[in-house]
Image: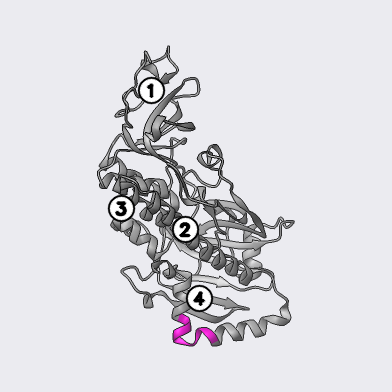
Amino acid sequence: MSNFFPLGGRPNPQDYLGSKRFIDQGTSPVLDVVIVGGGPSGLTLAILLIESGLRVRVLEKRHHIGDHSRAIGIHPPALEVLDRAGVGAKILERGVRIRDGVGISRGKLIASLDFRALPGPHRYVLSLPQSETVAILRARLDLLDPEAFIGTTEFAGFTQLPGDAGLSVRAHHHSNAATTCEYELATRYLVGADGTQSSVRTTAGRKFTGEPYPDHYVMGDYPDTTEFGSTAALFLHHQGIIESFPMPGGLRRWVAWISPTEDRALGDLVSLRTGYILDESTRTMLSRFRAARHSVPQLAMGRVILIGDAAHEVSPIGGQGMALGLLDAAALAPILATGGDNRALLKQFSRERLSAVRVASRQAHLNMVLGRPSPERLIDFRDRAFGALTAIPMIRTAVAKKFTMDWTRG
């Protein structure tokens, strides 16, 4: 071990051009937790752990956050987690508060929801592009520990240290296209928060079982030319649903169910099913995706733990994915901060979080079923049923709670 890289800093390839690896020489782990993945779940976990006095590093293979809006909905339970992480006020300042939702069929209002009846401090769903959420969390993490986040660094594997002393995590740091250095971090725990294509999950040999749904969607962000303001709108069309959500900066997100063989532009689908005209030249984002569901059998096995999309994938229809990951982080942080033998707590954590995933998956599946194409002869019955049910205050409140993940409160 002629080359020693102190884990309190960042690798500088220019200082070690003749070497390949930098290894901690101590007999006990220097770090408490290494987190792979710098998305909302990984960053939130890092913040909560550092606030508890733990030494943490976040490895993120990307250098820039990117400007793709991705997920935009943050449900009330997730907002409470972000409050705990010290970013709630900034998140609220940047986002749009959705307090109402409407269902529209054949140009007529058939149902409405009022989120003001929700319990808790956040009686709304917040709309904020995921890229902005990540930027706010990154700034908070840098404030707590400027060395915690290590960008352009790719997870390369791990090995168990002797005597269950912890793990040695290998990583590749890319300072530029021509220079890569390999180094190792000794840590008590490794957390994979690196998304559905998780390298940590693959390296750990965890199964990720599930299947894709038959449902395909196309979504895009456009200047808002509707009269809905901060209200979310669902257009229940017999050819498939159109969802419409407000965004910061005067934008609006449109999501359309689409046949896998259909190649119509999103603007054409919106015009056909809603009557609203979208100017494709003003679009700021476009994405097409297929819904799927997957999960691991356990989130925690030994000293390797998976959270967020690395551990479970639910259909994005309903916007529950980010919230599940943030709730994973909030539940895991106090367990890792306890020290000592926490195996029983980690088993309980895994059971409870997978139970929440199953509930969210069922809700997401229902959301998709309701938005699929339906025979025109059933439209009248469906519309009358929705209208009658949501006219009952108790049912309307129950539906609002279901859509905003109030069930996660237990």
- In space, the residues marked 1 and 3 are separated at their CA atoms by 31 Å
- The residue wearing badge 2 is 351
On the image, the x and y values in percent for residue 114 come to: 42, 77
Badge 3 vs badge 2, beta-carbon distance below 8 Å: no
- Secondary structure under tag 4 reads strand
Could you tell me the amino acid type at mark 3?
Ala
Q: Which residue is mark 3?
A: 85
The quarter of the picture where the N terminus appears is top left
Identify the mark at residue 23; answer none if there is no mark.
1
Lower position in the chain sequence, tag 2 or tag 4: 4
Q: Nearer the viewer, residue 289 or 45?
A: 45
Give the Cα separation between the discs numbered 2 and 4: 35 Å
**Residue 127, position as x, y percentages in the image:** 42, 61
Residue 71 percent across, percent down from the top left:
49, 55
Please tell me whether mark 1 sits on a helix, a strand or a loop.
Answer: loop
**Badge 4 amino acid:** Val
Say which residue appears at 54% left-offset and 81% top-offset: 109
Label 2 vs 1, first from the N-terminus? 1
Q: Quadrant of the C terminus?
A: bottom left
Label 2: state its secondary structure: helix
Q: What is the magenta range? A: 389-396
Q: CA distance from mark 4 to mark 1?
A: 57 Å
Q: Secondary structure at mark 3?
A: loop
Residue underneath mark 4: 102
Instruction: Give the residue type that dot 2 points to.
Output: Arg
Q: Nearer the viewer, mark 2 or mark 1?
A: 2
Whether residue 191 is visible here, answered yes or no, is: no
Q: Is residue 390 magenta?
A: yes
- Comes first in the chain, label 1 or label 3: 1
Q: CA distance from mark 3 to mark 4?
A: 32 Å
Task: Tell me which residue sits at (46%, 78%) in the image.
Answer: 398
Judge depth for marks 4 and 1 and give the one in front: 1
